[in-house]
Image (cartoon, helix red, strand yellow):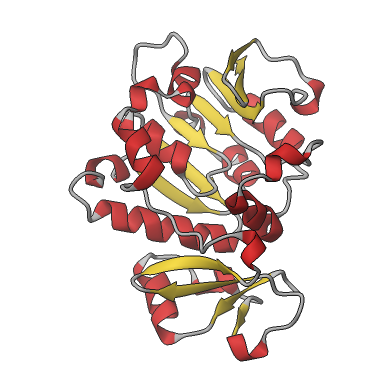
Amino acid sequence: MPSWIAVDHPDFRTRLRQLELPLNCLDGFWSTESELTAEVSAVLEYRDGCVQLRPLDKALGNPVTVDFIHGKTGFRFLRASHEMVVKAVAGRSKEPLTVFDATAGLGRDSFILAAAGYPVTAVERHPAIACLLWDGLDRAHLSLEGASVAGRITLNWGSSQTILAQLAEPEQPDVVYMDPMFPERTKQALVKKEMRLFREVVGEDPDGELLLEVALGVARKRVVIKRPRKAEPVAGRKPGYQLLGKSSRFDVYPT
């Protein structure tokens, strides 16, 4: 039994069609709240005009939606050039760069990179997170502040490894960006309630090392990986250089 379900309602199915997400992305997860079992910790639903992931346990926090325009993300994208992720991706390059976000998640880094002017291809494979992301980006398209930024992002649902490996040479990105969810060795990573819910639903990325290998063979200029500040490099592979923040860092692998 999965740890989450998608609440089967005609409005939700209609919304997925509007977002051009295939309905089969939620195959095996459609259910009704009357059929909930003890194993289910969250429900994916369409409510109050947006897709949300609602935890059934208060310890997992509040419902999660994707909102690029308001709150912390809204503040960050307005000052995108100051963001460390932008500096890591840009390196010393002055020319326009294409970016492939291989672990899009809730899309915040993709949106900040797009706000800095980069065309971004963002890929998310988890069906629940994909629904949240597609819905949030669609609403950003409809906003005055975010429309131009959202227009620089192309979303894909699927495996980044597969998509990257199949790219023709002219389509290969300048930079591949990764923020994989690896097993954490400390309890600090679970402080934020949103992250608790995220891990409960998504789990970890056991193939992060393989994704790095594929990315290194495709990126024209560099691969950038976001990591907890004190975590080991992915696969023990030493980066060319690092950008350090207070709680996280960016490992940069020139190609």
Q: Nearer the viewer, residue 63 or 31?
A: 63
When asked about the image quadrant of residue 111, the answer is top left
Q: Is residue 217 visible?
A: no
Q: Is residue 41 visible?
A: yes
When asked about the image quadrant of residue 93, the answer is top left
Q: How far from the left and from the top, in percent, is residue 42?
A: 62, 70
Left or right, 82 with respect to 125, comes to left
When asked about the image quadrant of residue 217, the answer is top right
* Residue at image location 62% in from the left, 26% down from the top: 247
Q: How far from the left and from the top, in percent, is residue 120?
A: 41, 37
Q: Nearer the viewer, residue 193 or 134?
A: 193
Left or right, 247 with respect to 238, comes to left
Q: Nearer the viewer, residue 108 or 161?
A: 108
- Image height of 69 relative to 33, above or below: above
The quadrant in which the N terminus is found is: bottom right
Residue found at the very far left of the displayed protein:
144
Q: How far from the left and from the top, in percent, is residue 236?
A: 81, 22
Disc tally is 0
* Residue at image location 42% in from the left, 71% down from the top: 16
* Residue at image location 38% in from the left, 73% down from the top: 15
Q: How far from the left and from the top, in percent, is residue 6?
A: 57, 75
Residue found at the very far bottom of the displayed protein:
34
Left or right, 64 with respect to 125, comes to left
* Residue at image location 51% in from the left, 64% down from the top: 63
The quadrant in which the C terminus is found is: top right
